[in-house]
Image: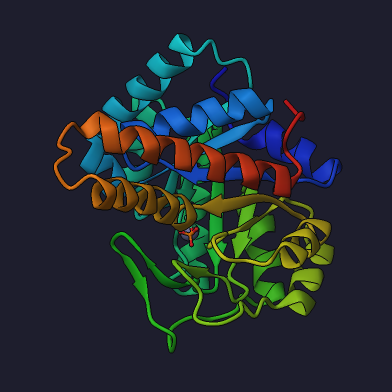
Amino acid sequence: PLVSMKEMLEKAKAESYAVGQFNLNNLEFTQAILQAAQEEKSPVICGVSEGAARYMGGFNFVVKMVEALMEEYEVTVPVAIHLDHGSSFEKCMQAMKAGFTSVMIDGSHYPLEENIALTKKVVEAAHAVGVSVEAELGRIGGQEDDLIVDDAEAAYAIPEECEKLINETGVDCFAPALGSVHGPYKGEPNLGFDRMEQISKLTGVPLVLHGGTGIPTKDVKKAIELGHAKINVNTESQISSSKAVRQVLEEKPDLYDPRKYLGPAREAIKETVKAKMREFGSSNKA
Ligand code: G3H
Ligand code: ZN
């Protein structure tokens, strides 16, 4: 069933695993992610950025597509449709109106007080209709769609500020930027585990790790131990699927039926998502 993230993340935190947020880019991504979740018996969060929603046909269409596939596949595991990096109160409202069960309001580029005020406003509206909310502090580096943060701008979240934001807004989960990056890492990721531990001790909410592509398994496990209950993955599925497309087209330069290259792309996404679910420990937790 379609649900908010609240219960699935509280359960994950209590039982020390993380639920994956896998971003939707098109029909094949949506099919692959829902099939993977059902086959792994794993809860799942379908992440939808504003750019990806625009590409796919809008918030309403995305909700209808997910619902239709869930019905077709007889999905029984908990599924959330979550606005990824919501840029404004208005965008969050539009997504909720379309049927999103969860939203992220990304006020991380605003000064603390403004971020808190904006997040609080979204939480009030969302909680009134049972929609969960994620907020962010600090700045996650790299690029995802319209969101570009260069190295100089990337900043680690400050534990006391995280505590303040969480207490004053009532968010359901929280993403502190701690050195993770959107897109491939240049070298090894350097996650701020000391701060992560402090934030975890100061606050009780499930934490969210953005930039889940390319983080070594040992760091993933440590982040989960330190309170992360949601890990976002997009680039890794994009890389595995485009690799599959490239391979098919290189082997058969005369091929033109999209099903012949998008089918293998879909399989690649499914394998990537399943592997992440096992790594995060969410398999068989639905
Ligand atoms: O919000 C989405 C994610 O943080 C995805 O990060 O593309 O590096 O896996 P990624
Ligand atoms: Zn992100």
Name the one closer to the observer, 41 or 175: 41
Q: Quadrant of the N terminus?
A: top right
In the rendered image, the vertical position of residue 232 relative to residue 95, given as above or below: below
Query: Which image quadrant is residue 78 in?
Result: top right
Residue 11 lies left or right of residue 148; in this view the side is: right
Residue at left offset 67%, top offset 30%: 42
Query: Which image quadrant is residue 62 in?
Result: top left
Residue at left offset 41%, top offset 32%: 30
Residue 226 lies left or right of residue 64; in this view the side is: right
Name the one closer to the observer, 222 or 268: 268
| Rendered location of residue 215, percent (x, y) | 63, 66
| Rendered location of residue 265, percent (x, y) | 37, 41
| Rendered location of residue 90, percent (x, y) | 31, 45
| Rendered location of residue 148, percent (x, y) | 34, 71
| Res 78 seen here | no
> Please, which residue is most extreme toward the bottom here?
152
| Res 18 seen here | yes
Residue at left offset 71%, top offset 43%: 278
